[in-house]
Image (cartoon, grey):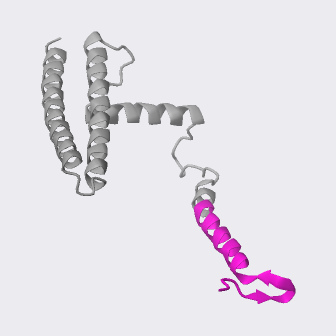
């Protein structure tokens, strides 16, 4: 079975079509970048011109204000409670990844058991233990988040 039609000189139409499709997709990716690469325009009459450093300073202060409004701490000084909170958050996130891996492994064991009751019961037990562990992780996260918030608010 032939997948490409041959034309002049033995050149395959399928390869040409693939090249044209690749070029079209690449151009769709590049066009928005070209549109954003425009020269800055002059300010309207009567308004002062701003330098690049003023614009970046204004953007940074605006983003900082927005981050503070959203509840993020933008100060550079890290308090011990914030460091401990971050460590606890990272540890719980790692445990969440372990839960996901255990769940996938238990599902794999169950799907490949092929009727082997011993392997099915092992997979069910592993899945049950993983879900119980995830509930404990969720409770630990809720408790630690509450405690860290209360300590931070009181300091």
Query: Residue 133 sits in which quadrant?
Result: top left
Nearest the eye: 49 or 98: 98
Which quadrant holds the N terminus? bottom right
How far across and how far down the image is residue 148, in percent? 18, 19
How far across and how far down the image is residue 124, in percent? 17, 45
Left or right, residue 116 beside residue 2 = left
Q: Residue at x 62, y 60 (%)?
A: 30
Query: Would you place residue 27 above or below residue 17 in this image?
Result: above
Left or right, residue 12 beside residue 137 = right
How far across and how far down the image is residue 51, in percent? 59, 36
Q: Residue at x 60, y 56 (%)?
A: 33
Question: Is 15 included in the stretch rendered in magenta?
Answer: yes
Query: Would you place residue 50 above or below residue 151 in this image?
Result: below
Report the span colored magenta: 1-30
Query: Would you place residue 104 above or below residue 99 in this image?
Result: below
Which quadrant holds the C terminus? top left
Q: Residue at x 20, y 37 (%)?
A: 130
Extreme residue toward the right, this view: 9
How far across and how far down the image is residue 122, in percent? 20, 42
Question: Is 78 included in the stretch rendered in magenta?
Answer: no
Left or right, residue 136 beside residue 39 = left
Across the whole image, how many numbered discs are drawn on residues?
Answer: 0
Left or right, residue 101 beside residue 155 = right
Query: Residue 141 sits in which quadrant?
Result: top left
Q: Residue at x 52, y 37 (%)?
A: 55
Nearest the eye: 19 or 131: 131
């Amino acid at each position: 079975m032939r997948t490409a039609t041959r034309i002049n000189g033995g050149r395959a139409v399928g390869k040409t079509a693939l090249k044209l499709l690749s070029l079209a997709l690449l151009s769709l990716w590049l066009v928005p970048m070209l549109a954003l690469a425009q020269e800055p325009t002059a300010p309207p009459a009567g308004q002062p011109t701003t330098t690049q450093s003023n614009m970046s300073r204004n953007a940074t202060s605006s983003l900082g204000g927005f981050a503070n409004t959203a509840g993020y701490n933008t100060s550079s000084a890290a308090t011990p409670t914030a460091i401990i909170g971050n460590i606890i958050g990272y540890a719980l996130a790692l445990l969440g990844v372990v839960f996901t891996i255990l769940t996938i492994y238990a599902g794999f064991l169950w799907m490949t058991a092929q009727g082997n009751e011993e392997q099915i019961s092992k997979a069910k037990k592993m899945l049950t233990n993983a879900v119980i562990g995830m509930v404990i992780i969720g409770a630990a996260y809720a408790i630690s988040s509450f405690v860290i918030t209360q300590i931070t608010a009181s300091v």
